[in-house]
Image (cartoon, rainbow, N blue to C red):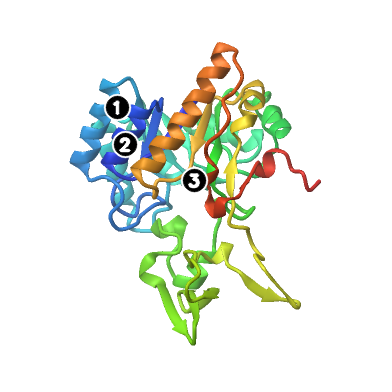
Amino acid sequence: MEIVCPAGTPAALRAAVKAGAHTVYCGFNDETNARNFPGLNFDRAEMREGVEFAHAHGAKVLVAINTFPRAGSQSVWHRAIGDAQAAGADAVILADAGLLDYGARSYPELRLHLSVQAAAANADIINFYADTFGVKRVVLPRILSVPEIAAINAETEVETEVFVFGGLCVMAEGRCSLSSYATGLSPNMNGVCSPASHVEYIDDNGVLNARLGGFTIHRTAKDAPAPYPTLCKGCFSAGGQTGHLFEDPVSLNAEQLIPQLQKAGVTALKIEGRQRSKSYVAQVVRNFRAAVDALEAGTPLPEGMLARLSEGQAMTTGAYKKTWR
């Protein structure tokens, strides 16, 4: 199975490749990708150098161009597809139907992957994208159980890629409106979720308020660690109770499900976290590469060492097991 690893910077790309990543995904430093944060991503020269480095070490590079163009501004996204192809990218990851059409017509030799932002969660819609635009792989949303993934693979020739580690989104993945409600900036349109420019930490008589776009997301004691204020993972009071009403701050970890995912026909395992450090990327990649190598060798999977890298130091298998049913 192929391990697909995040790289928010050229240094993270090199760290991922050296740690054993089969494939790295990254994006340009503009609003064409869904991690458009200051200090992250690649300019055109860095992308060319990153692809050359990866290819020299036997790894592939996928370029995420997975936001949705505004009417009249699509040339920015069109240029990004052309620049990815010119840089030698092994595929581009797209979500918008217009961009898929443009990519298929303008660069027929360029491999197209369907982003999780397209929220394609059944075989009918996946086959539509394959038949219409020639999509070769789909990144499945994190809302499917392992049997549901197996059922999809039985009805499509399109490769499937699934998340195995990292942060989780609310169960309407790929269609988030919460960040844009709070800040006016959207993950799908502007490439940013909970942007730092809209974050405030305010001392209120010994209590630290973490705010996003004017909304108080967390209140913690002054000396206690204050989490980053992301609206979907905020702690709120309602109905006389206080808790995480949208989503708990917990990481997905499907490491021990890799054999089941392989039997379900999954082609690639995706690790979330382009905003993470190169040290984080290297540690997670080494762990998952060891697990995949053990699977291929027919030996027991190694015990995971990922708990301290998880969000809130808590982990879940999420929808893969759907234990709430």
Q: Classify mark 1: residues with Cα within 10 Å, few (<14), some (14-19) or many (20+).
A: many
Q: Position of residue 7 (x, y in %)?
A: 36, 40
- Residue identifier under label 3: 309
| Label 2 vs 1, first from the N-terminus | 2
Q: Is residue 66 above or below residue 31?
A: above
Looking at this view, is 250 or 31 the one in front? Answer: 250
Label 2 neighbourhood size at 10 Å, few (<14), some (14-19), many (20+)?
many
Report which residue position mark 2 lands on.
Answer: 13
CA gap between label 2 and label 1 equals 8 Å
Disc 3 versus disc 1: distance between alpha carbons? 25 Å
Q: Which residue is mark 1?
A: 54
Furthest residue in direction left, as rendered: 45
10 Å neighbourhood of mark 3: few (<14), some, or many (≥20)?
some
Residue type beneath disc 3: Leu
Q: Is residue 135 visible?
A: no
Which residue is at the front of the view, 186 or 5?
Answer: 5
Looking at this view, name the residue that lies furthest to the top: 297
First in residue order: circle 2 vs circle 3: 2
Q: Secondary structure at mark 3?
A: helix
Asked whether, in this view, residue 110 is left or right of residue 56, the answer is right
Task: Look at label 2 and name its amino acid.
Answer: Leu
> In this view of the protein, which residue sits in the foreground, 42 or 125?
42
Is there a contact, CB below 8 Å, between mark 3 and mark 1?
A: no
Q: Earlier in the sequence, mark 3 or mark 1?
A: 1
